[in-house]
Amino acid sequence: MTGGGRPIGDIRETVVKGAVTATSHPFHDDRGRFARLFDRGLLNSVHTDRPIVQVNHSLTRQVGALRGMHFQGMPHLEAKWVRCIKGRVFDVAVDLRSGSPSFLKHAVVELSAEAANMFFIPEGCAHGFQVLEPESELLYLHTAPYSPGAEGGVRWDDPLLSIDWPLSPTDISKRDLSHPLLTEEFKGLNI
């Protein structure tokens, strides 16, 4: 092989309908490694006709820091691929689609640069993560542009979700602490 890398493959379903993980197969040689991070053709069974319209990058410095649980509501629903390009995170998708067979269930995956894996989070799901290694960086490929009026969130510690975070949170934004509990405002989520 001359550097094209083996394709993305190993697509696995999760407990959340439509949320999957996919793993790249990097090419390694004495110079380092090369990996294909996204291939719409190979991932078309999951990605279908959704265009990627925005790519975002985040850096979270502190181990235990928690971001989430975020989503975009109607009419700006988005799906996204999330990949860890440095470090390691505990990544979570929560199904907020009231008609879904996995309604209020959550899927978790450990994403890391070393594992070369990514997580597809479908429309109508909230997303969040906790940092397991310092200076962790995530790359997000979105199917809709960010729309401030459509942003929403649910609490990371909502009792209806019972997410078993691996570490005690060390850093949560004021915004994320102010998200409503699902028991308080679930009908107002506009998913």
Image (spheres, helix red, strand yellow):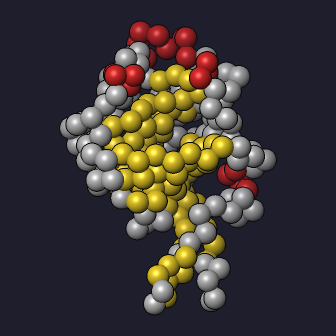
Question: Residue 148: x and y, percent?
Answer: 59, 23
Number of numbered callouts drawn: 0
User: Can the viewer see residue 145 in this picture?
Assistant: yes
Question: Residue 124: x and y, percent?
Answer: 60, 30
Residue beneath the point at 39% across and 36% down: 67
Question: In the picture shown, does residue 85 fall above or below 19?
Answer: below
Question: In the picture shown, does residue 127 fall above or below 184?
Answer: below
User: Can the viewer see residue 90 in this picture?
Assistant: no
Q: Quadrant of residue 37?
A: bottom right
Question: Residue 112: x and y, percent?
Answer: 40, 60
Q: Quadrant of residue 178?
A: top left
Nearest the camera: 65 or 160?
Answer: 65
Q: Is residue 125 left or right of residue 112?
A: right
Nearest the camera: 51 or 22?
Answer: 51
Residue beneath the point at 37% across and 53% down: 136
Residue beneath the point at 52% across and 22% down: 152
Q: Is residue 169 left or right of residue 128?
A: left
Residue beneath the point at 64% across and 61% down: 38
Question: In which quadrant of the rendered image does the C terminus lie?
Answer: top right
Question: Residue 79: x and y, percent?
Answer: 63, 40
Question: In the picture shown, does residue 68 fall above or below 85?
Answer: above
Question: In which quadrant of the rendered image does the N terminus lie?
Answer: bottom right
Question: In the picture shown, does residue 181 fall above or below 87?
Answer: above
Nearest the camera: 46 or 38?
Answer: 38
Q: Is residue 87 left or right of residue 70?
A: left
